[in-house]
Image (tube, rainbow, N blue to C red):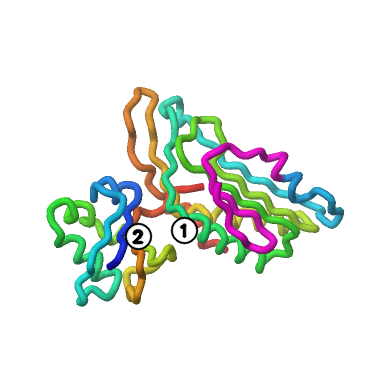
Amino acid sequence: MKGRSVPGATIRIQRDPFDVPAETARLTAGRADIGGVVAFTGLCRDEGGRLRALELEHYPGMAEDEIARVAQTALARWPLLGLTAIHRFGMIAPGEDIVLVIAASAHRRAAFEAADFMMDYLKTRAPFWKREHLIDGTTGAWVESKAEDDAAAARW
Amino acid sequence: MTKLVYFAWVRERVGKPDETIDLPGSVTTVAALLDWQKTRGEVYAHAFEHASVIRVALDKTHAGHDAALGDAREIAFFPPMTGG
């Protein structure tokens, strides 16, 4: 497990699963100024039963750096009281979690927007690549990037 | 010496995750480096055939194809990202 130090944010790239309630509690424990927490979890789909697993390759070091850059931008743009981003790598089975973004703020709008922004930017800038492993035992193709992800990031 | 690192299908096509080499002095931009890679034999010609879609990072920071290499010590080549 590797972390990156960004004041006000927790960034982790890890092979192991994460615990959403525990990560949420870590942001809110012992404080009473947070009025809203938005947690987004991205999961591995089975693609209609076709997929046995997704393999996530990443660029160690740069993955942490890029997510930290995106987090710094979010912290500068919204009045956040907590921000967590965790991205897994390795083999991930359908139904398992891949990515978690949690944003906490005094009011809901900032938390919703910051979490949305984090996901859009993370998808287009963080160096991760997905490859499909199929139910018939073969290794499928590298997942292609989607133009709609670039369009989503361009909204901000 | 410069360390070149490869990810995803670029890594598979090149056939190795990284290599350390001396770049020719004439190769001073990302675009020139992508062109030069194509000249390094069949394997590289295939890997860098569609160079316009390949992303590059200089010392773990995204760089456009028009960027100068400067004194980057680690240069990464990879497809568009598909995380999240």
- Residue A124, given in percent of the width and then of the height, sits at 47, 56
Which residue is at a point 36% across and 70% down the rendered structure image?
B72
Position of A146 relative to A7 (above/below)? above
Q: Does the magenta run of residues contain B52?
A: no
> The residue under label 1 is which amino acid type?
Met
Q: Secondary structure at mark 2?
A: strand
Give the numbered dot on residue A62: 1
Q: Residue furthest right?
A: A32
Read off the residue under disc 2.
Answer: B76
Residue closest to the eye, B47 or A3: A3
Left or right of B38, for residue A87 = right
> What's the residue type where badge 2 is placed?
Ala
Q: Residue at x 65, y 52 (%)?
A: A84
Q: Residue B3 at what x, y percent from top left? A: 31, 62
Q: Residue at x 34, y 63 (%)?
A: B75
Is A96 situated above or below B82?
above
- Give yes or no for residue A18 being in the magenta stretch: yes
Range of the magenta residues? A1-23
Q: Dot 1, how many residues are within 10 Å of its Cα: few (below 14), some (14-19), or many (20+)?
A: some
Residue A31 lies left or right of residue A54; in this view the side is right
Q: Chain of mark 1?
A: A
